[in-house]
Image: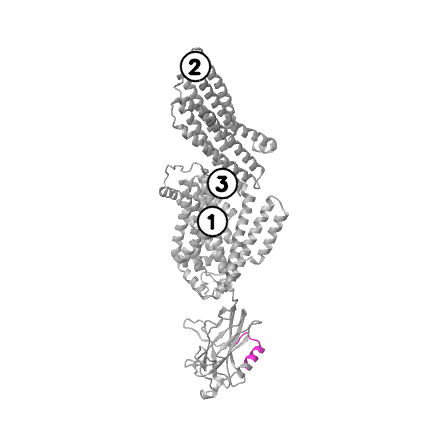
Amino acid sequence: MEHVIRKHPLSPCLILAAFVLAALCGPSNGSSAPGARAHANSAAPADTISGTPASTITIIKPSCPNGRDCSGDGQHVSAGSTLDLPLAVRVLRNRREPVARQPVTFSIVSSPSGARGQRVEPQVATSDENGEARAYVTLGSEPGEYILTASTPGLRGGPDVLVFKTYARSQRWVFFLVIGLAGGLGLFLYGLHLSSHGMRRSTGSRLRAILSTITNNRLVAVCVGAFVTMVIQSSSATTVMLVSLVQAQMMSFTQTLGIILGADIGTTITVQLIAFKITDYALLIVGAGALVMMASKHKAKDVGETILGIGLVFYGLHVMSQAMEPLRTFPPFLDLLLKLEHPLVGLVAGVVFTAVIQSSSAFIGILIALSRPGLLTLDAAIPLLLGANVGTSITAIFAGWNARREAKRVALAHTLFKAAGALVFIWWIPAFADFVRWISSGAGAGENPSALSEAAAFVPRQIANAHTVFNVALTALFLPFSSLAARVFTRILPDKEEIEKEPFKTKYLDESMIATPALALNLAKAEVLRIGDIVIDTVEKIVTPFVDRDEGVLDDIDLNERRIDFLTEKVSDYLRRVARQKVAEERVNEVFQMMYTTTELELMADIVSKTLRPRAQKWLEQDLFFSEEGKAEILDYHVRTLKQISRALEVFRDLNLEKAEAMKRKHRKYRSMEMDFMRTHFERLRRDVPETIATTEVHQDLIEQFARITSHATNIARMFLAWSAEEKKANPGVEKAAS
């Protein structure tokens, strides 16, 4: 739609200057500059055009068929460059009929301080048969705003003037864009890391207690997953943690499904915080966090680290937004954004970028940063957002790649939940966008602004709300069918016997969990229990050479010994590093209990490998057999020894003090049985039983070594009982309250 600009922001002095310049460079003196790219003819006096008075001649900025301004106004180019499009005006008679051969004067009336080299070619252009006159403009050497005018002489003492504003970017704007994006993203990611680390350090001791509340109640699992993810600020980290816990057999796969869906809701909290426009106060938050860190100790220092991280998140977001300002007027980038509005292209781009930076919160933060200067609309952001939700599952896939089948199902469930949700939502993006606008403040369902600058005020919040709505809807959609989903995932990845290809490799220890001691101790406990299982296997096999004369198990015993030594060293090192973290006193006690238990298990294995294994080798070299009574006694005491080790592991796993007391009673009984077996063995010697006489030394040694193993197993129970007694003395009120 054509329109006449009657008012413009120029000051009266600026208008007067334009008029004087127009008079000096009027058609009597001006002509098209040589080599100009515009179609310009030599200027003709106004009175030679027609007999119509010049006062009826006016100029307007031409419009394109789509109604947009085609005058070349508002262009942005690098300093020292020529505008991509010429400045254009249209000369009309009586505001309707195009006027040909009318001279129009183009002038630069304002430029940044120190700018050099700016010029207009031609300064005076003549309108063509459509009434249009054009001039090409080269901006000066300095970035900033350049103001130009177009005028034509009138008969009433002044020109009809149009005003054009153009802008020059810094010649190194691409360089500053790149370093601004890189630095802002670095601050953003480091801020996320700091705040997550601080939150985990300050609340990590409670995370295990929270996870222990997990039941088969789906809603409870969702709430726990949302809370834990809100604390550690990463759904990927929560899913990786679930992979580790399932790998450690501390949770079942079915229990994790609700937590996975809840984790997806929890990660939206971080994005909602990012959407708040408090970037102006980011440095204040950084300063407050640094002050708390420097002035505090222990947990308060962790709180300061959290505050500092949040400040860096917002400051990084501010840096990225500022760096991307020039992209608002960079046509290739705007064309790229238009291509990303295609749902499948945006979805794939979101998956790829999120997989690269391994954080959906960070990528959605970048989307919000793009929307602040008006570069991204909600409709274009939604496919990218859906892709980000799918891409965040890549981390969990890598974490579960070499895990047990049940742990792999956790990663598979996270991925398929997200992928299925994205495929459901991608078909109704316009309706989804309208719904998000309706529930968001700033724009209703009917307010769909076409101007990016208008949308920038509320699109960041809408993007955050779209992320929240998607994940809440995903939970509502799949939670009722979680049992069915568990069966489907189990069918996709069925259970199968897993052969341990690498005997000298930890199975549960996770280096990334050391910063969260409460969770790291869970994994260490699982590894200690694994050592216990290997010890039981070793003790169980050592009797075979003596009663069945099977030499093949000796190689298995040797392999188990090397495996136990390796795992003991790894667990001890892992526990020492956990203990060097800022941990509460009760966590220090747990570290001691695990190291003590590990030592006792290693001593049991040493009895087998260093004492009984050489005895077995020598036994097989001789043609000796136990008497039936002696063999029965050895097997009986051997079974009781294995049971005592199993009880010790149960006490260690469940902190079952009643079973610990029962173990002490059993041990006294076993000591009495040892004496009884020695007495019956002596009776057989008195009766001159040949087998007893030939095997007396081996028989007594086996019973004695099994008794030693039983004693080491009982020491584990004694240690927990002693620790419990000390706790009762230190906190007498706790026991009274409990009773």
Q: Is the residue 66 above or below the residue 461 in the image?
A: below
Closer to the chain start, of discs 2 and 3, is: 3
Amino acid type, callout 1: Ile
How crowded pointer 3 is (Cα within 10 Å; few <14, some 14-19, many 20+) is rated as some
The residue mark sitting in front, 1 or 2, is 2
Closer to the chain start, of discs 1 and 2, is: 1
Q: Could you say which quadrant of the image residue 586 lies in? A: top right
Real-space CA distance between mark 1 and mark 2, rounded to the nearest whole angstrom: 74 Å
Residue 209 shows in this picture: no
Residue that mark 1 sits on: 265
Residue that mark 2 sits on: 693
Amino acid type, callout 3: Leu
Real-space CA distance between mark 2 and mark 3, rounded to the nearest whole angstrom: 59 Å
As drawn, is 687 to the left or to the right of 597? left
**Segment tinted magenta in the rendering:** 7-19
The residue mark sitting in front, 2 or 3, is 2
Question: Where residue 682 appears, x then y in whole percent?
Answer: 46, 13
Question: Where residue 344 appears, x then y in whole percent?
Answer: 39, 57
Residue 524 shows in this picture: yes
Residue that mark 3 sits on: 211
Q: Could you say which quadrant of the image residue 49 lies in? A: bottom left
Q: Main secondary structure of the magenta part?
A: helix
Question: Where residue 293 appears, x then y in whole percent?
Answer: 61, 48
Q: Is the residue 468 above or below the residue 622 in the image?
A: below
Closer to the chain start, of discs 1 and 3, is: 3
How crowded pointer 1 is (Cα within 10 Å; few <14, some 14-19, many 20+) is rated as many
Amino acid type, callout 2: Ile
